[in-house]
Amino acid sequence: MKLPSWRKMVAGAGLQRDLGEIRDLVVRYVKEETLQPLKDLGRFVAFGAVGSVFVGLGTVLLLVGALRYLQWQFPVLDGSLSWIPYLVVAVLAVLVIALALWRVVSGAAKRRLKARS
C-alpha cells in the first residue's frame, strides 16, 4: 500500500521534528549538567582567590604595622637590639601561618570524614 504524498511529508516532518527535539534536549542537558556547574565552580574559585589575596595583603599590612609599632613604642630596641622587633614579628607571622594551616587541616573535610565513619 502506497501512502499519499501528504502523508509522506507528515511522517518525514515528524521524524525530523523528533530528531530536532532530541538534539535540543541533549544540548540543554549538556548545558545544565556540565557547563553550568563549571561556571559556578569558576565563580567560587575566583571569589576564593580574590578573598585570599585580600586576607593575605591585610595580614602583611598588620604585621608591618606591628613592626612599626614595636620600633616606635620601644626606642630602647635601637642600635644593637634592633633585630628584636623583627624577631617578634617573624614569630607572629609563623603563628598566623600555623593557625591557618591548622584550620585547613581540621576543617570541614575532617568533619565529613568523621561523619561517614
Image: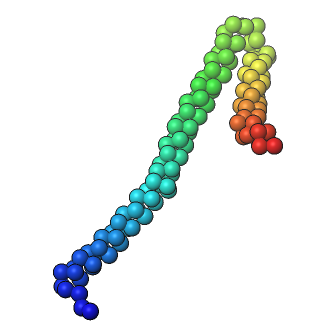
Q: Can see residue 45? A: yes
In the displayed structure, does residue 84 sit left or right of residue 64? right
Which percent across, then down, holds residue 60?
63, 26
Q: Quadrant of residue 102?
A: top right
Q: Quadrant of the N terminus?
A: bottom left
Q: Residue at x 72, y 27 (%)?
A: 96
In the picture as drawn, the residue positioned furthest to the right comes out as: 117
Q: Nearer the viewer, residue 73 or 15?
A: 15
From the top left corner, tell me how far across and down residue 27 is, in percent. Answer: 40, 62
**Quarter of the image containing the C terminus?**
top right
Which residue appears farthest toward the bottom when viewing the image?
Answer: 1
Q: Is residue 41 left or right of residue 81?
A: left
Q: Residue at x 29, y 73 (%)?
A: 14
Task: Tell me where residue 90 sits by quadrant.
Answer: top right
Image coords of residue 105 (percent x, y): 76, 37
**In the displayed structure, would residue 75 be above or below residue 117?**
above
Q: How many marks?
A: 0
Residue at image coords 79%, 39% = 114
Specify the color scheme: rainbow
Decide which of 51, 72 is in the foreground and name it: 51
* 62 relative position to 74: left or right: left
Q: Residue at point 76% right, 39% down?
A: 115
Residue 91's place in the image compared with 106, above or below, is above
Residue 86 occupies which quadrant of the picture? Answer: top right
* Residue 55 locus on image (x, y percent): 59, 29
Seen from the viewer's position, the closer of residues 108 and 23 is 23
* 74 relative to 8, above or below: above
Q: Is residue 42 visible?
A: no
